[in-house]
Amino acid sequence: MINFHVDRSSSVPAYAQLVRQVREALRIGTLRPGDQLPTVRSVVTACTVNPTTVLKAYRELELSGLVEARQGAGTFVSGTLGHADPHVMARLRGSLARWLGHAREAGLEDEDVQALLASVIAANAAPARRENAEGAA
């Protein structure tokens, strides 16, 4: 089961943080079809958010086809994102955790790490976009 958290200092609305956490859990394989999401009440208690916030997040996930609400039973994962091999994901997660340890030793903070990661993703996405555009031409 997923354990939600809400960063009050973030500019991202709380409901969007919850949606993002579910989407990320689906991508890395910690949530799979059939898994049950925490009850609205438990998320409200754990994250100290309004029930409407949780309901909005769950509704957005439902509209995108990722979860389904079952009357009296709860909210269950019904869709998937990503197709990576779970063993590969686990190995890469371990490598990334070691890398993050090195980054912390070098004095990098969360925002530094996020900026670095975003810059690498952007730099590697540009050549892929060019290749796709050239292939379509």
Image (tube, helix red, strand yellow):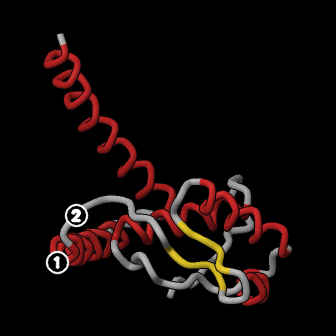
Provide the residue designation for mark 2: 84
Disc on res. 132: none
- Crowd tier of the residue under label 1, counting other residues whose Cα lies within 10 Å: few below 14, some 14–19, many 20 or above: few
Vertically, is 59 above or below 128? below
Three-letter residue code for mark 1: His
73 lies left or right of 94:
right
Secondary structure under the numbered disc 2 in the rendered image: loop
Give percent across and percent down for residue 46.
Answer: 72, 87
Residue depicted at x 17% and y 77%:
87
13 lies left or right of 25:
right
Secondary structure under the numbered disc 1 in the rendered image: helix
Three-letter residue code for mark 2: Ala
Provide the residue designation for mark 1: 87
Vertically, is 126 above or below 87? above
Find the residue positioned furthest to the front. 71
Residue depicted at x 56% and y 54%:
64
Q: Quadrant of residue 34?
A: bottom left
Q: Which quadrant of the figure contains the C terminus?
A: top left
Residue depicted at x 84% and y 68%:
52
